[in-house]
Amino acid sequence: MYLTFAWRYFKAKKSANAINWIAWVTVGVIAFATACQILVLSVFNGFEGLVKSLYSSFYTDIKIIPQTGKTFILTAAQIQLQKNLPGIQAVSLIAEEKALLQNDDLQTIVYLKGVDENYRKVSGVAEKIVEGKFNTGDINEPGLILGAGIQNAAGVNITNAAAASLLTVILPKKGKVSMTDPLQSLSEGNIKATGVFAIQQDFDNKYAITNIDFVKRQMGFAQHEYSAAEIKLTDPSNLFQVQNQLSTMLGSSFKVQSKYEQNTSLYNTMKLEKWAIYAVLTLILFIAAFNMISALTMLVLEKQKDISVLQSMGADKSMILKIFLGEGLLLAAIGAITGIGMALLVCIIQIKYHLFKLQGGSFLIDYFPVKLQASDFILVLSTVTFISLLAAWFPARKAAGQLIELR
C-alpha cells in the first residue's frame, strides 16, 4: 500500500516542473553511479582473475619453508608422509638461492631455483616455455630454464641456429665465510641454457630454474637439506584443511604457506585498489542523495494537503513516514535497475566482442577483461538502498510530523 501511494506521487503531475526534473535527475545519477560501480568492480574482477591465473603458474597451492633460517632438514620418511596425506597430488623439493649468472662479459643477478623431477607436476612453468624446452638436466650436466627478462639481460642464446649459451653460475657456499679469502666462500659451476619461460615480469626478470642436485652440491647442502617443498593439491578447495594438517604434522619448525600467503602483498593490493575505487564511486551516490532530499522535500511541500487528508482519515505518523520512504526507495529502485541493465549490457558486449581495448600494447591481452560476480550486484544494491533510505529519512520524517491542516 505504501509503494502504491509512492508510485502515484511519482507519476502524478506536479504543480512545479522543477520537482519532476529533480526526481529524474536523481534517478539518472543513481543509474550512472550504479552502472559505474558494476562496471569497475567487474573489470577489477577480470584483472584479478587474470593476475591470479598468471601467478598460479609459478606459485603452488602450498609451500613449506623453514620457520627460521634459509634451509631445513626433511627426511625421506617425512616426505613420504606428505605424499600419502589425502588431498596431496604431488610434492616437489626445492633448493633456492640468489646467484650471479655470467655469459661472457654480461652478468646479472638471478634467484636460482633447483628443482626435482616432480616440479612439472606441481607448477605450470613447463607450459609457459616460449623457447627451447623444459630440461633441468642432471647433477653433472645441468640445464637452465631462464625467465625471458633474464635471457635479454644476459644475452643468452637458446635457438637451434647456433650452440646454446654455456653459462657460469656463482653461488655462496653454505656456512663458509672467509674474511682473508672471500672467494673461498663462493662456488662456480657451468650450466647450459635449455629453455626460456614467459609468465609475468615479476618472474621473468628474477628466476632461473635448474637441477636440484647441482645446486645442492654447489652450495654444500646435506643429503636431506632443502630450501622449500612445493605441493600440488588434488582439490584446491581443500587448501586450508590440508594446510592445517601439514602444520600439525610437521610442527613449529616449519611454516606452511597457502598460495595466497606466498604473495600477500599482491592480493592485499588488489583488494585495496578495488575497495578504494568502490568508495570513490559511492561518493556519486551521495550526490544523488542530495538531489533526492531536494526532490522529496519539494514533494512534501507539494502534498501537504494530501498528507492532511490522509491524517484526517486515520493515517498515523508511521504510515506517512513509510509512504515517503517508499518514494525514496522507488527513485532508487528505478535508477538502480536502469544502471544494472546498462552495466550488464556493456559487460556482455565486452565479454563477447572485446570492444574496449587496452592502450599501449604491452600487456598480455589487448582488451579490458570482465568478470561478473553476484556478490558485486548484492553489494551495489545494498549500498544504493542504504543511501536512499538515509536520504529519504529526513523529508519523510518532516512529512510525518506535519500537523493536520485542512482548508
Image: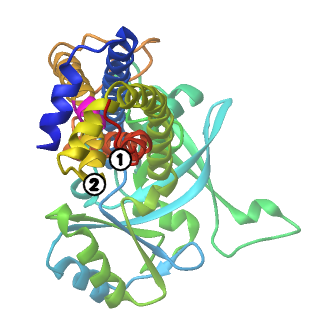
Q: Residues within 10 Å of mark 2 (few under 14, many from 20)?
A: few
Query: Which one is nearer the viewer's eye here, 100 or 390?
Result: 390
On the rendered structure, is 235 left or right of 288?
left
Query: Which one is nearer the viewer's eye here, 309 or 206?
Result: 309
Query: Which one is nearer the viewer's eye here, 98 or 188?
Result: 98
Quadrant position of the C terminus in the picture: top left
Farthest front residue in view: 407
Residue stretch rendered in magenta on the structure:
328-333
Visible residue check, residue 130: no
Q: Is 398 in the magenta?
A: no
Q: Give the amino acid at mark 2.
A: Ser
Q: Residues within 10 Å of mark 1 (few under 14, many from 20)?
A: many
Q: Main secondary structure of the magenta part?
A: helix
Position above or below: 171 against 52: below
Identity of the residue drawn at 34% across and 32% down: 304
Visible residue check, residue 237: yes
Residue 329 place in picture, x, y as percent: 26, 38
Q: Give the amino acid at mark 1.
A: Ala
Position above or below: 24 against 274: above
Q: Which mark is residue 78?
A: none
The answer to the question of whether label 1 and label 2 lie on touching residues, with beta carbons closer than 8 A, is yes
Q: Which mark is residue 318?
A: 2
On the rendered structure, is 339 left or right of 221?
left
Residue 106 place in picture, x, y as percent: 65, 30
